[in-house]
Image: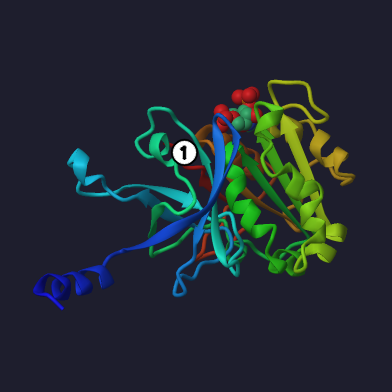
Amino acid sequence: MTAATLEAAPAKANSPFFEEKVLWVKHWTDRLFSFAITRPESFRFRSGEFVMIGLPPKADLGETKPILRAYSIASPSFAEELEFLSIKVQDGPLTSRLQHIQAGDTVILGKKPTGTLVLDAVRPGKRLFLFGTGTGLAPFLSVARDPDAYSNFEQVIVGHGVREVAELAYRDLFTREIFEDPLVGEEAQKQLVYYPTVTREPFANQGRFTDLIASGKLLADLGIDQPKFDPEHDRIMLCGSMAFIKDMAALCEAHGLVEGSNAEPGDFVLERAFVG
Ligand code: A2P
């Protein structure tokens, strides 16, 4: 062993990052794609958490540090691979490059997943509403594939709001595949409801979640006979743009729900969907 490799080894062990391999990439639209990477054996996370993701610096471009962004992990806590849902921003510092990754490429993974869109941060209840817009669906792909969601709640409602029908990524998962899942399939058949809505094209459900909730249409469509959320039974997780989570949080509060955190579980929790 040379002096150089002797020096390099401890530095890598102390690194805050893992270097993982891309397993697959799926492009949904010219603005949206999913990918999965290998999972290090020592990497633990709770369903719904996010982690830093990046690409190795390009030495030939004079880069010394990776560009990193926080990404919700879309796979459940026990999955063998780590899945992510990403936007593609043509001049985005990370996603302009990340959108071109292919199987076998290296992706950098942070060692410290964290976040509030976790079952631990909401109080016990009857119904769990998971409202995501755009890539804000990602943490709920994790939570809705976790058996704990179905043992903690009688009903799990996944709401995905997008501008165009083509952006309803994972529609097949929520309309078919999840019902055949060996771990949660049976529970999902009885307890999972998928509510997609589109705002800028004709679709079966149309309009913003804020409007659909304020008008009572969403609860009526779900067959829930109450005009508002019920602080005794309803728990809500929110993920999307700043404007979306701010407006939805105001609505939840107007319905009497209290925001929660890891330190103090509550009736609703929120997180911004990450961009760039
Ligand atoms: P809209 O098309 O009416 O703007 P975005 O891609 O901008 O994050 O939007 C994703 C989805 O979230 C769109 O359907 C968009 O509706 C909706 N949306 C954006 N802002 C809000 C908000 N403040 N409240 C509710 N829905 C929102």
Q: Where residue 158 sits in the image (x, y, percent)?
A: 72, 48
Quarter of the image with the N terminus is: bottom left
Examine the image and state in which quarter residue 97 appears. Answer: top left
**In this image, 169 relative to 182: left or right?**
left
Is residue 229 in sight in this rendering? no
**In this image, 235 relative to 182: left or right?**
left
Foreground residue among 40 and 240: 40
> Who's the residue at 31% across and 50% down the image?
56
The amino acid at mark 1 is Gln
Examine the image and state in which quarter residue 181 appears. Answer: bottom right
Image quarter for ligand 1? top right
**In this image, 121 relative to 233: left or right?**
left
Foreground residue among 11 and 226: 11
Q: Is 154 located above or below residue 55 in the figure?
A: below
Q: Where residue 170 sits in the image (x, y, percent)?
A: 69, 44
Residue lying farthest to the top in this orientation = 201
Identify residue for label 1: 99
State the SS at label 1.
loop
> Who's the residue at 27% across and 72% down the image?
13
Q: Does the residue labelled 1 lie within 8 Å of ligand 1?
A: no
Q: Where residue 90 sits in the image (x, y, percent)?
A: 42, 28
How many numbered dots are placed on residues in this image?
1
> Who's the residue at 42% across and 49% down the image?
70
**In this image, 18 relative to 144: left or right?**
left
